[in-house]
Image (cartoon, coloured by chain):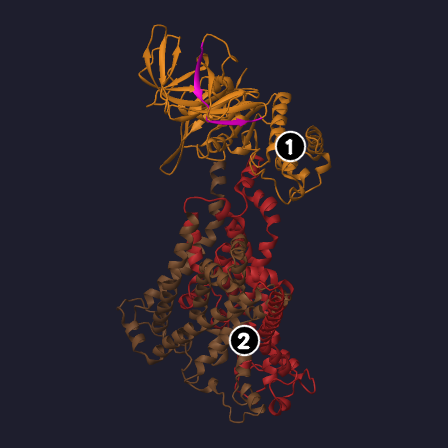
């Protein structure tokens, strides 16, 4: 009896967390999925009527904007952050004397709340008093920079702020990757007389493929979940010009009282995330268990 | 190239080129540093200027007359909607909710990680996988049901409710951190302790916990940063008196009443960012370790 | 003498994989049992099963006459030394050694006196206040031993305790373990993949392969009368020479014919009247093939073979020659005049020969 209990202790310890995850993650996904198939409005209803909410969602021009914004934002955010992160990482990898200080400077935005980042950039990009007036003050009197209030360009301000926040983090990832490359391989290449640029392009970068993948996953994940930054920077505006799926979902759930729509948009978001993350996690876990 | 003197000139040229390259490198790196520092600089200088100076001066200029009025307004008088008590009460809310949430989720993560890494049982890997997948869901998918559950539990709009939410959605990451750390500790250690007569709890308490300081620091910092900086749960599950500081900051910045006080906005933003920035400056090494551990495999 | 450890019909499966198959071993008080075999043979698993660290699928483990099959490791009255030493990294050496007593609620005074005793025995008094991280490999090994000794258990279990040490230290510690065994008269079970360790330490050896016991016996039995080709090949260094041969009956005993490249077959006559099949594998240890004139006895036969390679090793010189399609190692005296490419007359001591069935691998004589 005592021995039986002893054996069960690990399971008993893990149980509360497991139940919590089961209920509050997987149970809730099922609940949201269920509700997304009903006519729920202000209050949830539980009679399944089919994909009517998804039809409404895909017919909604606002959702359309949100999805295309996610695409624009996601692609630019990921590509620019990766490029900038990799560039800085390679530059920092050249035995720079003050590397520690520089690294600290490049990475601190990651410690900030996206609300703070949004607030700061909102001020910097302020059409009357921000960058615009600075450049005008330098003598370029016709310089105009009103992206923040221009519906066609506002989404790019989100990219600017997002890249500022996340690229340092990508740098840290890549730098760790650069440092983990087998030193002897690099030495061997040096002895063979291969130039530094070739060493990077032919040996170091290819061996960092897993890091590229990790960085991509993290950034994609950040992009899809982006909510705070848009709220703080543009509030989704002007109009709905910078709406993202996350802000759309929030608006329908908590301001418009359209639970069915909110649920279906959340489910679409989740599927987008899972389409990216599941293959990655699956391969990771499999590699680990082998 | 057989001529000795030619050889030497090319070598000299090569050296000069090297030095120029080096300077160029440092210049580029410094420019990047300026780019990252600029927003902080702008926030700080703006918060120390008067509104008058902001309107007439340049964004990038240093303040002519340093004034802390904006800071005191942001702290105790700025309006977050109808209330005008500044950030102070919300700052305390954030502290009040993040401290217990960090502690509970770290403790649970340590125990879970210990079980998953060292006391494997049939299905424990599956549980770990489920927890890991849970880290990656977009939280939008749980907002609606969680709002209802908090209502049922009578925790809607309360700080305990927010603590609960942060713990539930934090244990995935904390478990991952501890599991990845404990998995590097040889299993023979547990075996040796078992032969010595120690059980599950004793082994955790006497052997694993004393070893865990680095990962505890990483986890606490990660969780604190996450929870302090959270906006989505804060804005979804709090009400007027219980909002965390990020929500209050957003309300101050977006409050439409009266004149737009940019200096107060900036001061408020810095105040809201202060705790996590401080943690970053003091324990940056652990912060980075957490970031990379959270994304790169363990 | 009483039976101290008895393993009866033990099976161990991981899922559908059989790790250990029908293991039966018994040792008496004061025995030194060595479990030896190549990696993956199940020897460490067997040790863990004896310790109770792994559950067994079927069978019984008896320690000191009590059935311990369902008893926790802590209640089996055993102590264990691990390959990685498994010292508790945050505790000092003294705390490492007394932890087991502390957990069991032994009073502080007894703890201290036992600690002092063991520290003296292993000459590690100056190390007591250090942490494992500050110790060398050999010192850590010593602490791990101390942690086991202080418990004064019925059974000591060692899981490849010397394999993380460098060669010189390994030999020193081996001697020390042997001395401890003699001094304490304790019962020990020792896992290793190193057959020299097995030979030098054991009073009884179990050779394992693929979870099946190949042979149980004293070191001499295992060495001189290996039960099958695997044991013959695994135990001894350099390994036993195993030469395919054909037999036919002759006037006196059996004629053994071993093929040679570019030469007449080698013919040997075994005068012991054995009943052998036509095809056999002849096993002779390197020390049983010497230069002619250096061995006498009824079983000794001489023959001339071509020297292939000469490897002086100080005390001996190993000389290779090609026989039966294999490179045969012979162990000659240091002053031999053997030269590569030249013929030399060898003495084959058939008094020590082993015959194996080429199909089943089992011993024929």
Task: Kindly identify which chain the residue marked by label 2 belongs to.
Answer: A
Predominant SS along the magenta part:
strand
10 Å neighbourhood of mark 1: few (<14), some, or many (≥20)?
A: many
Q: Does residue A134 appear to the left or right of B165 in the view shown? A: right
Q: Is residue C70 above or below residue C249?
A: below
Q: Which mark is residue B206?
A: none
Q: Is residue A215 visible?
A: yes
Label 1 secondary element? helix
Colour of chain C in the image: orange
Front residue (pair C153, A35): C153
| Residue A264 % position (x, y) | 34, 70
Colour of chain B in the image: red
**Quadrant of res A270:** bottom left
Give the magenta-colored segment's residue range.
Answer: C299-313
**Quadrant of res B258:** bottom right
Q: Residue furthest bottom?
A: A141
Residue that appears at 50% across and 78% down:
A232
**Quadrant of res C202:** top right
Q: Which residue is mark 2?
A: A117
Q: Residue furthest front?
A: B3
Front residue (pair B238, A128): A128
| Residue A153 % position (x, y) | 43, 83
Task: Kindly identify which chain the residue marked by label 1 belongs to.
Answer: C
**Is A137 within the magenta?**
no
Q: Are marks 2 and 1 on the same chain?
A: no
| Residue C154 % position (x, y) | 57, 25
Colour of chain A in the image: brown
- Alpha carbon separation for disc pair 2 and 1: 59 Å
Q: Which residue is mark 1?
A: C146
Q: Does residue B49 appear to the left or right of C60 in the view shown? A: right
Label 2 secondary element? helix
| Residue A190 % position (x, y) | 54, 57
């Amino acid at each position: 009896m005592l021995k039986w209990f002893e054996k069960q202790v690990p399971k008993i310890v893990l149980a509360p967390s497991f139940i919590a995850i089961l209920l509050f993650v997987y149970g809730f996904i099922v609940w949201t999925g269920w509700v997304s198939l009903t006519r729920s409005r202000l209050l949830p209803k539980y009679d399944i009527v089919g994909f009517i909410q998804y039809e409404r969602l895909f017919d909604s021009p606002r959702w359309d904007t949100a999805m295309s914004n996610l695409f624009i934002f996601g692609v630019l955010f990921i590509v620019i952050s990766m490029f900038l992160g990799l560039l800085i990482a390679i530059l920092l990898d050249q035995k720079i004397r003050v590397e520690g200080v520089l690294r600290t400077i490049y990475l601190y935005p990651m410690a900030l709340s996206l609300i703070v980042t949004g607030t700061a950039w909102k001020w910097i990009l302020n059409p009357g008093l921000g960058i615009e007036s600075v450049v005008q003050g330098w003598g370029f009197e016709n310089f105009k920079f009103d992206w923040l209030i221009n519906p066609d360009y506002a989404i790019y301000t989100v990219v600017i702020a997002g890249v500022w926040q996340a690229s340092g983090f990508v740098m840290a990832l890549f730098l760790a990757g650069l440092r983990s490359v087998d030193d002897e391989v690099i030495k061997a290449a040096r002895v063979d007389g291969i130039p530094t640029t070739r060493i990077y392009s032919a040996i170091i970068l290819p061996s960092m493929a897993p890091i590229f993948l990790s960085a991509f996953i993290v950034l994609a994940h950040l992009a899809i979940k982006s909510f705070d930054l848009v709220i703080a920077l543009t509030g989704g505006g002007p109009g709905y010009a910078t709406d993202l799926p996350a802000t759309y979902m929030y608006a329908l759930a908590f301001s418009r009282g359209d639970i069915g729509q909110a649920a279906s948009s959340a489910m679409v978001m989740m599927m987008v995330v899972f389409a990216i993350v599941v293959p990655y996690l699956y391969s990771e876990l499999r590699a680990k268990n082998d | 190239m057989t001529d000795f003197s030619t050889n030497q000139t090319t070598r000299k040229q090569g050296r000069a080129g090297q030095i120029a390259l080096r300077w160029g490198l440092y210049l580029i790196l410094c420019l990047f540093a300026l780019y990252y520092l600029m927003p902080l600089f702008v926030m700080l200088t703006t918060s120390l200027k008067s509104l008058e100076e902001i309107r007439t001066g340049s964004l990038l200029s240093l303040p002519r007359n340093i004034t802390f009025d904006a800071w005191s307004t942001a702290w105790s008088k700025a309006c977050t909607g109808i209330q005008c008590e500044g950030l102070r009460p919300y700052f305390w809310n954030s502290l009040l909710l993040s401290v217990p949430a960090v502690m509970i989720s770290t403790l649970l993560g340590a125990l879970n990680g210990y079980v998953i890494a060292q006391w494997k049982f049939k299905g424990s890997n599956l549980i770990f996988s489920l927890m890991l997948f849970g880290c990656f869901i977009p939280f939008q998918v749980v907002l609606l049901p969680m709002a209802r559950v908090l209502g049922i539990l009578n925790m809607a709009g309360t700080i305990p409710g927010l603590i609960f939410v942060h713990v539930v959605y934090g244990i995935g990451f904390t478990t991952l951190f501890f599991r990845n750390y404990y998995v590097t500790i040889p299993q023979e250690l547990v075996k040796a302790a078992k032969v010595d007569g120690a059980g599950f709890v004793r082994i955790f308490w006497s052997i694993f916990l004393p070893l865990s300081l680095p990962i505890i620091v990483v986890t606490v910092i990660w969780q604190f940063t996450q929870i302090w900086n959270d906006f989505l749960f804060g804005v979804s599950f709090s009400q007027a008196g219980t909002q965390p500081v990020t929500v209050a900051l957003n309300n101050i910045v977006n409050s439409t009443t009266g004149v737009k006080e940019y200096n107060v906005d900036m001061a408020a933003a810095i105040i809201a960012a202060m705790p996590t920035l401080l943690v970053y400056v003091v324990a940056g090494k652990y912060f980075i370790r957490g970031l990379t551990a959270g994304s790169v495999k363990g | 003498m009483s039976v101290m450890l008895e393993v009866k019909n033990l099976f161990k499966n991981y899922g559908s994989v059989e790790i250990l198959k029908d293991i039966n071993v018994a040792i008496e008080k004061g025995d030194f049992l060595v479990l030896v075999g190549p990696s993956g043979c199940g020897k460490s698993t067997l040790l863990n099963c004896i310790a109770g660290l792994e559950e067994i699928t079927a069978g019984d483990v008896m320690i000191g006459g009590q059935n311990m099959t369902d008893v926790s490791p802590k209640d089996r009255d055993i102590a264990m030394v691990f390959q990685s030493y498994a010292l508790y990294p945050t505790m000092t050496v003294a705390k490492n050694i007394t932890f087991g007593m502390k957990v069991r609620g032994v009073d502080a005074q007894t703890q201290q006196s036992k600690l002092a005793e063991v520290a003296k025995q292993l000459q590690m008094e100056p190390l007591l206040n250090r942490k494992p991280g500050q110790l060398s490999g050999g010192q850590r090994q010593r602490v791990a031993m101390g942690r086991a000794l202080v418990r004064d258990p019925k059974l000591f279990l060692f899981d490849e305790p010397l394999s993380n040490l460098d060669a010189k230290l390994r030999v020193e510690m081996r001697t020390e373990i042997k001395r401890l065994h003699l001094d304490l008269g304790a019962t020990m079970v020792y896992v290793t993949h190193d057959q020299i360790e097995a030979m030098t330490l054991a009073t009884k050896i179990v050779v394992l392969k693929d979870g099946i016991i190949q042979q149980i016996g004293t070191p001499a039995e295992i060495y001189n009368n290996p039960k099958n080709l695997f044991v013959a090949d695994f135990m001894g260094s350099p390994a036993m020479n195993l030469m395919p041969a054909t037999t036919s009956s002759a006037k006196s005993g059996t004629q053994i014919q071993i093929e040679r490249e570019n030469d007449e077959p080698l013919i040997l006559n075994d005068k012991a009247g054995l009943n052998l099949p036509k095809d056999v594998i002849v096993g002779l240890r390197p020390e049983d093939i010497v230069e002619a004139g250096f061995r006498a006895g009824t079983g000794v036969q001489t023959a001339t073979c071509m020297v292939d390679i000469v490897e002086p090793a100080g005390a001996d010189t190993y000389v290779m020659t090609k026989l039966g399609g294999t490179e045969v190692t012979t162990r000659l005296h240091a002053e031999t005049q053997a030269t590569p490419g030249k013929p030399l007359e060898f003495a084959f001591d058939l008094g020590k020969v082993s015959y194996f069935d080429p199909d089943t691998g089992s011993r024929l004589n």
